[in-house]
Image: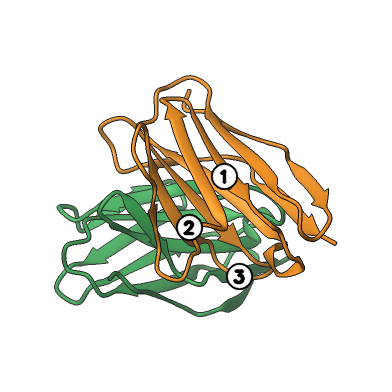
Amino acid sequence: GAVVSQHPSWVICKSGTSVKIECRSLDFQATTMFWYRQFPKQSLMLMATSNEGSKATYEQGVEKDKFLINHASLTLSTLTVTSAHPEDSSFYICSALGQGTYEQYFGPGTRLTVT
Amino acid sequence: GENVEQHPSTLSVQEGDSAVIKCTYSDSASNYFPWYKQELGKRPQLIIDIRSNVGEKKDQRIAVTLNKTAKHFSLHITETQPEDSAVYFCAANAGTALIFGKGTTLSVSS
């Protein structure tokens, strides 16, 4: 149980375009999901906390107008990278908070390359 | 906000030796401390976690200790094997979110 999927697993886009990444909890309802960014050989950096039915809470230094997060249902959160630039190229990982626990279940990640 | 420091950044051991990774945290309100193993290009995998009401937890070759007073927690891997080679991250909760340490690259040579 507690499976989280992400789609797509990798994407290449041109500079200036937008890309949407989906994060789904497959076998449980997740009122809270998280989005992380991980640059090569670095740690996971929390970008934002996504709560179902409300606005996401962004970490300091993360541009909310550039990284649009929507958590419209208890099983789906989306991250849209708008007007992507090469410096946005990274590994984006989502996680979902287990029910009644602190444990987070991670998705497999999405490799974004902006050319 | 919460800050998590992790040491060492790299660790090389011989197969069969023990490995210890240490972390410190800053927020005394944190009460959940997980450890993750991540292989290249893959998602982090939870290997063990500990709550603040427990001082030590063990699962086969892996153990975690927590010193709440000093705000330290450590991962201990005994009888290391080549398949233990990976990047290990500690984390501490800030509310429901997790703040990660910078990671330790563990290399186990046979």
Q: Residue at x 64, y 41 (%)?
A: A21
Q: Is disc 1 placed on a helix, strand or loop?
A: strand
Mark closer to the observer (2, 1) = 2
Q: Is residue A9 above or below residue B63?
A: above
Instruction: Look at 65% across and 66% down and name the residue there.
Output: A39
Q: Position of residue A73 (x, y in %)?
A: 44, 25
Lower position in the chain sequence, tag 3 or tag 1: 3
Going by the numbered disc 1, the residue's amino acid type is Leu
Q: Position of residue A108 (x, y in %)?
A: 63, 41
- Same chain for mark 3 and mark 2? The answer is yes
Chain B on-screen colour:
green
Left or right: where A20 falls relative to B20: right
List the residue tagged with mark 1.
A79
Q: Which residue is mark 2?
A: A64
The answer to which quarter of the image holds residue B110 is: bottom right
Amino acid marked by disc 2:
Lys
Residue A64 vs A52, above or below: the answer is below
Q: Which residue is mark 3?
A: A42
> Are dots 3 and 1 on a single chain?
yes
Chain letter, colour orange: A
Subunit bearing disc 3: A
Residue B77 visible in the shown view: no
Label 2 and label 1: CA atoms lie apart by: 11 Å
Query: How crowded is the residue under tag 2: few (<14 C-alpha within 10 Å), some, or many (20+)?
Result: some
Crowding around mark 1 (Cα neighbors within 10 Å: few <14, some 14 to 19, many 20+) is: many
